[in-house]
Image (tube, grey):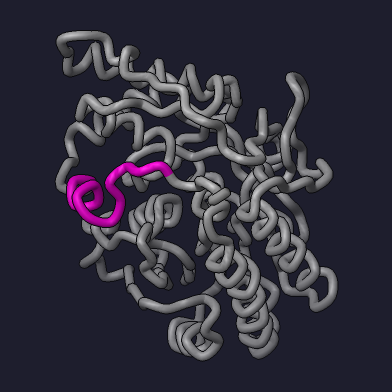
Amino acid sequence: MRVLVTGGAGFIGSALVRLLVGEGDVEVLNFDKLTYAGNPNSLRSIANKPNYQFVQGDIADRGAVDAALAVFRPNAIMHLAAESHVDRSIAGADDFINTNIVGTYTLLEAARAYWRALGEAEREAFRFLHVSTDEVYGSLGSEGLFTETTRYDPSSPYSASKAASDHLARAWMRTYGLPVLISNCSNNYGPYHFPEKLIPLVILNALEGKSLPVYGDGSNVRDWLFVEDHARALWTIVRTGRPGETYNVGGHSERSNLTVVETICDVLDGVVGGSSPRRELITFVTDRPGHDQRYAIDAGKLEAELGWQPLETFETGIRRTVQWYLDNDWWWRPIRSGVYKGERLGLVAS
């Protein structure tokens, strides 16, 4: 099987590429623009494998996408390329509109032209998986779960751009028959996570004795999904999911942001020790504008229909994650000293 992965040098994308290349009988083409969060070092372990190829390209560049499809001739496209950080979308939404909406439209059109030219058997087997987020659903109250039929209610420029791309993908299925599947996942964490996001930022700040910023009072709740569990889910969906369907992917691990930060502190205290508890580094800062209170995923459809289950609990996954950052400073130190030094993002100028 030949799979084209967009955004395969990003956090979730690189986990997926490592999984697919490790399958052995899957040929993978990683098509990635290599923005600030795209890191070839995340793929160092598989970079020289014979079933792996890389093309640097922008999904909004129709010519580049057409060329990649024509040469590689994939059986499936797994679309993960996206601008994904809410805080950056608040500070400036242009890249989110251009990549997440215009880029997805361009990719869908290129995929449709490629798919229509396939032979009947290949056309029947082809799949286009559009990978999205639970943030398109907006905010939950203290009870309930997001399902595949939850009404969209995005709050940030990021989630609005992903909602728009979801609607485009569905429309290309319904209007043109392109065999599209959509997945909406909860918050991912794990190895190779760019340190602008909460968990890696807290791990690295705590290691360096810096303050640990928590938005508002820390009561905002997210469902946490270990990234390798998510990669397995995506591979399951593209192979056995039904075109036209949406599948929610969650980790059964709801935690408040404050609990997440405190857990990381406790794990680090137990593993590396220190002169004082790292919880003392926690600092409450002005909340993010439009900060959704709670996300929680019902992944029952994916589990019942396709047989997927997360392998990691939050406790096992966070310990694996902390240990990975302790063991792999070769990956994160160049980022912390160059591209992103841990500064606050997403502040709106008054």
- Front-most of residues 221 and 81: 221
Q: Residue at x 25, y 35 (%)?
A: 324
340 to 225, vertically: above or below: below
Residue 43 vs 336, above or below: the answer is below
* Viewer-nearest residue: 326 or 118: 326
- Residue range corresponding to the magenta coloring: 332-344
Q: Position of residue 108 (x, y in %)?
A: 65, 76
Residue 242 counted in the magenta span: no
Q: Residue at x 70, y 83 (%)?
A: 120
x and y percent of residue 340 in the render?
30, 51
Along the horizontal axis of the image, is 319 left or right of 240? left
Q: Is residue 137 among what the camera can see?
A: yes
Q: Residue at x 77, y 60 (%)?
A: 244
Point out residue 212 in the picture as x, y percentages from the top left corner.
36, 26
Q: Residue at x 51, y 90 (%)?
A: 63
x, y percent for residue 282: 38, 19
Give above or below for 337 relative to 315: below
* Total numbered labels: 0
| Residue in the foreground of this view, choosing between 23 and 333 | 333
**Quarter of the figure with residue 36:** bottom left
Q: Is residue 240 visible?
A: no
